[in-house]
Image: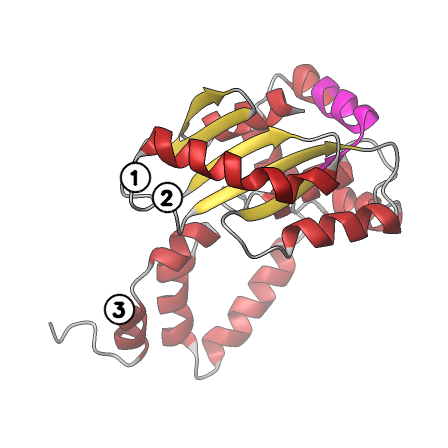
């Protein structure tokens, strides 16, 4: 699983630094202040105790003032099944507020095998595969109706959820295109066409990390028609 995630983060244009307990990632673009430590953990109950060591080692390597407030820990955890006990363990780790913003990515060996099979069959990267499949109705229905008990469908939604820096380049030619177009037409004939256009220009195809970096005053001025005053 760590190979899959490593490849994905490299496809997202991050640089990796090997550590004894995992891999540390930072963006090639130095203006993007987001740092990710990826580690494989067999026991979730020990993660909280080890995070201080993780944090200090990463901070020492990066020597970057932005790291402290932008440090993320992605924990890969293999399970045989995903049940309520596992969910409670994940919740305890992710809700811990100290040092690192933590995300636990659960996976099963069978899911990884099936995902690798289809990536190899289609000769495609995981980033491209996510772009093409996350908003396909059929894929989502399999995930929803057989949640966490399917080939690779639930796994790709977990990946997208736990790695918010993923910026999808989704074509509107999938099953949601009709709904998108209908909603756009409703907006265009109403009183919100200009606001909707501004919002699309600001947010379209931006990741959650990039949206957080947008200056609040800029958004306020745009929405109040003051973008041309300066």
94 sits to left or right of 217: right
**Residue ID at (49%, 22%):** 19
Residue 171 image label:
none
- Magenta span: predominant SS is helix
Q: Is residue 21 magenta?
A: no
**Can residue 27 be seen from the camera position used here?**
no
**Residue ID at (76%, 42%):** 139
**Span highlighted in magenta in the image:** 106-117
Observer-nearest of 33 and 111: 33
Whole-percent x, y for residue 203 in the image: 41, 59
**Can residue 180 be seen from the camera position used here?**
yes
Q: How far apart are marks 1 and 2 (CA)?
A: 6 Å
Confirm or deny contact between disc 1 and disc 2 (CB under 8 A): yes
Position of residue 224 relative to residue 82, above or below, is: below
User: Local crowd at mark 1 within 10 Å, few (<14), some, or many (≥20)?
Assistant: few
Image quarter hosting the N terminus: top right
Q: How far apart are marks 1 and 3 (CA)?
A: 27 Å
User: Local crowd at mark 3 within 10 Å, few (<14), some, or many (≥20)?
Assistant: few
Confirm or deny contact between disc 1 and disc 3 (CB under 8 A): no
What SS does tag 1 mark? loop
What SS does tag 3 mark? helix
222 sits to left or right of 95: left
Q: How far apart are marks 3 and 2 (CA)?
A: 25 Å
Give the quarter of the image for residue 127.
Answer: top right
Residue pointed to by mark 1: 64
Whole-percent x, y for residue 68 in the image: 39, 47
Residue pointed to by mark 3: 218
Give the quarter of the image for residue 16.
Answer: top left
Whole-percent x, y for residue 31 in the image: 27, 43
What SS does tag 2 mark? loop
Residue pointed to by mark 2: 67
């Amino acid at each position: 699983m760590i190979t899959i995630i490593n490849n994905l983060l490299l496809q997202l244009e991050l640089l990796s630094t090997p550590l004894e307990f995992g891999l540390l990632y930072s963006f090639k673009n130095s203006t993007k202040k987001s740092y990710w430590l990826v580690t494989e953990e067999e026991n979730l109950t020990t993660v909280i105790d080890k995070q201080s060591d993780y944090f200090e080692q990463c901070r020492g390597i990066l020597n970057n003032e932005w790291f402290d407030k932008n440090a993320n820990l992605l924990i890969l955890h293999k399970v045989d099944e995903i049940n309520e006990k596992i969910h409670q363990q994940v919740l305890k780790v992710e809700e811990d507020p100290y040092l690192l913003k933590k995300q636990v990515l659960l996976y099963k060996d069978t899911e990884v095998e099936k995902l690798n099979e289809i990536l190899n069959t289609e000769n495609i990267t995981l980033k491209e595969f996510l772009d093409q499949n996350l908003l396909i109705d059929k894929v989502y229905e399999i995930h929803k109706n057989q949640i966490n008990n399917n080939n690779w469908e639930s796994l790709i939604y977990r990946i997208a959820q736990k790695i918010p820096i993923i910026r999808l380049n989704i074509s509107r030619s999938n099953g949601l295109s009709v709904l998108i177009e209908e909603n756009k037409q409703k907006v265009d004939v109403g009183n919100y066409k200009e606001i909707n256009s501004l919002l699309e220009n600001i947010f379209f195809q931006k990741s959650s990390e990039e949206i957080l970096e947008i200056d609040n005053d800029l958004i306020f001025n745009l929405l109040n028609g003051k973008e041309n005053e300066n």
